[in-house]
Image: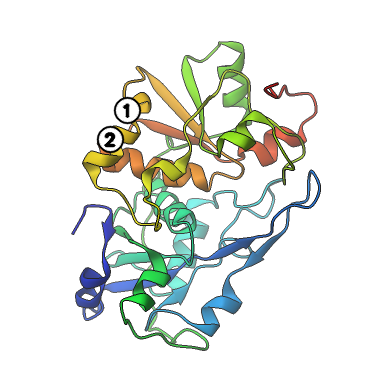
Amino acid sequence: MSAQFVNIADLSVLMDDPNVVIVDATVELAKPETDGDWRGLTGRVQFEAAHVPGAQFFDLLEDLTQGSSNFHFAQPRPEVLAAAMARIGIGSESTVVVYDNHGRMWATRVWLMLRAIGFDRVLVLDGGVQQWATAGGAVETGLPATLDPVTAFQPAPRASIFVDKAYVEAVVVGDVDATLVCSLGADVFAGEGITRYSRRGHIPGSINIPASLVLNDSGRFLSSADVARQLDQLLSIPGEIVLYCGGAISASLLAFGLVQAGREDFRVYDGSLEEWSADLALPMVVMT
């Protein structure tokens, strides 16, 4: 068993442990038809159609976000997140196994959110629910099981993980010495094609390291050694690195890969391009 992810065989054993809580974190993002066409759908319907036996649903889109924020998926206050965890059976003695139905980025977003409040017993299911079903794993339908109440985890926040727009502005103008890393695909980074965000391109001074580099062609995690080879450029950057993407989702996947490769001194811009591109006073770069 890896320190951060588990395979199908691991999960089959872990399911018998009463302290293990399995969580589905699926969200669907629709392909944009025009610039600024941001459309997200909760994965709750998919969860009710088929999920790993005993799993709970963690609704990143509708429940687990800071409601007063001007962007989706904003990290909730620590006590709010801990209370939401308790409602689905995650307490101070729990171990969480989280999965999604594609891309692993929603699962790693939950991993990062919980890590940010000091909860480290989080494992990501390698290959997600598709690999589970393909391997012959049973699935359930309908609503999640009702769990006994648990005492909420007492957060011990790591304030260094998430940064805000003002911090990234300081990086851009040179007041903070850090390297900005965009984890989106090369086409989005370059500003090619339609974007779901307000403007195309990337934050000035960024480099592009797509989060997809940490997965193989079938959506499985690479070994730690292979991840380290894929992220060699990123691992060799001295000083602070700040990861971003569209909404700090694929950036979470890249952060997960960095931890697998042995580097944990990263920060994540929570608002990412959804927030940055909406502020017309802030610069964007389109490659021509």
Q: Is residue 60 visible?
A: yes
**CB under 8 Å between callouts 1 and 2?**
yes
**Which residue is at a point 51% across and 37% down the rendered structure image?**
183
* Residue of label 2: 228
Above or below, comparing residue 167 to residue 81 in the picture: above
SS category of the residue bearing label 2: helix
Q: Position of residue 273 (x, y in %)?
A: 65, 37
Quarter residue 218 falls in: bottom left
Q: Is residue 150 visible?
A: no
Residue 80 in the figure: left or right of residue 198: left
Residue 257 in the figure: left or right of residue 14: right
Q: Which mark is residue 232?
A: 1
SS category of the residue bearing label 1: helix
Residue 39 in the figure: left or right of residue 187: right
Q: How many marks?
A: 2
Q: Residue furthest front?
A: 217
Choose between 273 and 83: the one closer to the eye.
273
The quadrant of the rendering that contains the N terminus is bottom left
Choose between 213 and 67: the one closer to the eye.
213
**Which residue is at a point 35% across and 43% down the rendered structure image?**
257
Q: Position of residue 108 (x, y in %)?
A: 42, 53
Number of residues whose C-alpha sits closer than 10 Å to that of mark 2, classed few (under 14), some (14–19) or many (20 or more): many
Q: Amino acid at mark 2?
A: Ala
